[in-house]
Image: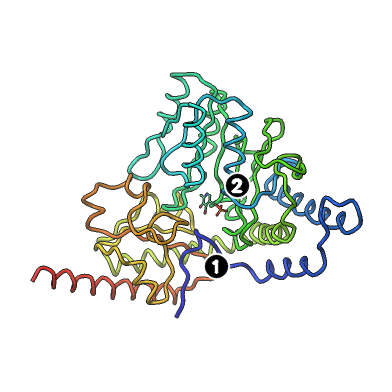
């Protein structure tokens, strides 16, 4: 049996997405910048996807800029805000994905900008009072970059509240929405955000396609310069077939939210029930076990035994899940986020595991997973006893 519980790292592509890409590959190949028929045809396909994404997210098509991934969208926004909007300070938190964490660190160190990390609470939520205090106590031109939902523990953050605090203090607000766009119906114009990012492979689209939302009139400029594609914000011949796949995936996601959320939430609920039965001392990270305040796609736990090889052992049983931080497979120690939530003594006695779901999972797979975890725990217990004797 091969089962996949790592959909927060990447998702399996929908058949319809693959078909849309293959048809595009067979029928459309013109360079979208060429003025002849072949080019115009490709350009029209890209603009159609842009319009569709803009429609689903409630923005103007000109505010959607295609990129190669979420990482690039975040880099484009953060680097350009620093370079072209003259911010003097960045406020972020330890919760951010590496592409935000590393980028903010690098630009702040290069440009000698102040970098403030918001403290996080034991439930993985952010301390908004400190954000207000930071902004009010020292009024500086600031970029606040805080994600919409965390890719490791699944907490969803109140970006309306964060955006309002930013508005009141004239700060720019960027939100990494890689784990929420394509997972929930989101109207970006109704949210007080200036910038956001998305990645197609997180919602059953292809790898190598993403987009940045850049609010009209904010004055960002390109990081990748050249032919002036993407309204001069991201040069380079567009990934036509990737964009077609992303368009199909985004459309499918937006047309099926109700069903998908219901089905995946019920799988997550079932997993919690089964895990509680098998491991009464299990710990849920952040708000992970709260079906309303966390992503329906992510369940992050500390198993009540220590086993640094759990990823390997699950792999031997054909189970794919993530142990350390998201998207950095192979990591076998607790990530910065998990470390920030628990005392060292707790981490020493437990094993972090992130399970992430999609509509392709089933209760049968969850039964197999929990049974496998029980077997792994027993083996680990036997190993520990042998060591003691
Ligand atoms: N931001 C978050 C929250 C993520 O989970 C990921 C996943 O890898 C990224 C950014 C990076 O996206 P991509 O893989 O498209 O570069």
Callout 1: helix, strand or loop? loop
Distance from disc 2 to disc 1, alpha carbons, whole Å, reads 27 Å
* Quadrant in the picture for residue 389: bottom left
Q: Left or right? Give the position of 276 relative to 104.
A: left
Q: Going by the picture, which residue comes out furthest to the bottom?
A: 1
Check residue 34 in the rendering and tell me which mark sits there, or answer none: none
The residue sitting at 60% across, 47% down in the picture is 72
The front one of 186 and 387 is 387
Q: Residue 279, how many percent across, how many down?
A: 27, 66
Mark 2 residue crowding within 10 angstroms, few (<14) / some (14–19) / many (20+): many
- Across and down, in percent, residue 336 comes to 36, 47
Q: Is residue 381 above or below residue 146?
A: below
- Asked if ligand 1 lies within 8 A of label 2, the reply is yes
First in residue order: circle 2 vs circle 1: 2
Seen at 63% across and 61% down, the residue is 205
Nearer to the camera, 128 or 265: 128
Q: Residue furthest left?
A: 389
**Is 147 situated left or right of 66 in this image?**
left
Residue pointed to by mark 1: 359
Number of marks present in the image shown: 2
Q: Give how far across and how far down residue 102 sits, in percent.
A: 47, 42
The foreground one among 383 and 187 is 383
Q: Residue at x 26, y 53 (%)?
A: 347
Q: Circle 2 sits on which residue?
A: 72
| Residue 250 at x, y percent in the picture | 66, 57
Q: Is residue 285 left or right of residue 103?
A: left
285 relative to 234, above or below: below
Q: Could you tell me which residue is drawn at 38 percent across and 77 percent down?
A: 317
């Amino acid at each position: 049996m091969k089962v996949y519980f790592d959909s927060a790292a990447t998702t399996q592509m929908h058949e319809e997405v693959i078909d849309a890409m293959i048809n595009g590959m067979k029928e459309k190949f013109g360079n979208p910048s060429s003025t002849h028929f072949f080019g115009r045809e490709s350009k029209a396909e890209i603009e159609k996807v842009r319009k569709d994404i803009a429609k689903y997210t409630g923005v103007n098509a000109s505010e959607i800029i295609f990129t190669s991934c979420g990482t690039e969208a975040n880099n484009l926004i953060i680097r350009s805000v620093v370079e072209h909007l003259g911010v003097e300070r960045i406020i972020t938190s330890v919760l951010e994905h590496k592409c935000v964490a590393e980028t903010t660190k690098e630009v702040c160190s290069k440009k000698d900008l102040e970098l403030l990390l918001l403290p996080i609470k034991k439930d993985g939520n952010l301390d908004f009072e400190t954000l207000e205090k930071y902004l009010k106590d020292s009024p500086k031109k600031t970029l606040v970059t805080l994600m919409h939902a965390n890719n490791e523990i699944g907490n969803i953050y109140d970006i309306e509240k964060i955006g309002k605090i930013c508005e009141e203090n004239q700060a720019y607000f960027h939100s990494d929405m890689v784990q929420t766009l394509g997972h929930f119906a989101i109207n970006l114009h109704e949210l007080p955000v200036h910038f956001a990012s998305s990645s197609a492979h997180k919602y059953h689209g292809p790898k190598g396609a993403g987009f940045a939302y850049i609010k009209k009139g904010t004055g960002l400029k390109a990081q990748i310069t050249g032919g002036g594609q993407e309204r001069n914000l991201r040069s380079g011949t567009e990934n036509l077939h990737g964009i077609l796949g992303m368009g199909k995936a985004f459309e499918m996601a937006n047309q099926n939210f109700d069903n998908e959320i219901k089905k995946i939430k019920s799988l997550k609920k079932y997993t919690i029930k089964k895990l509680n039965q098998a491991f009464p001392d299990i710990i849920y990270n952040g708000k992970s076990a709260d079906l309303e305040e966390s992503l329906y796609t992510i369940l992050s736990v500390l198993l009540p035994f220590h086993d640094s090889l759990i990823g390997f052992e699950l792999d031997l049983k054909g189970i794919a899940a993530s142990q350390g931080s998201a998207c950095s497979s192979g990591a076998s120690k607790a990530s910065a986020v998990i470390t920030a939530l628990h005392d060292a003594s707790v981490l020493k006695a437990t094993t972090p595991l992130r399970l992430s779901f999609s509509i392709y999972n089933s209760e049968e797979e969850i039964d197999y997973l929990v049974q496998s975890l029980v077997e792994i725990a027993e083996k680990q217990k036997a190993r520990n006893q042998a060591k003691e004797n």
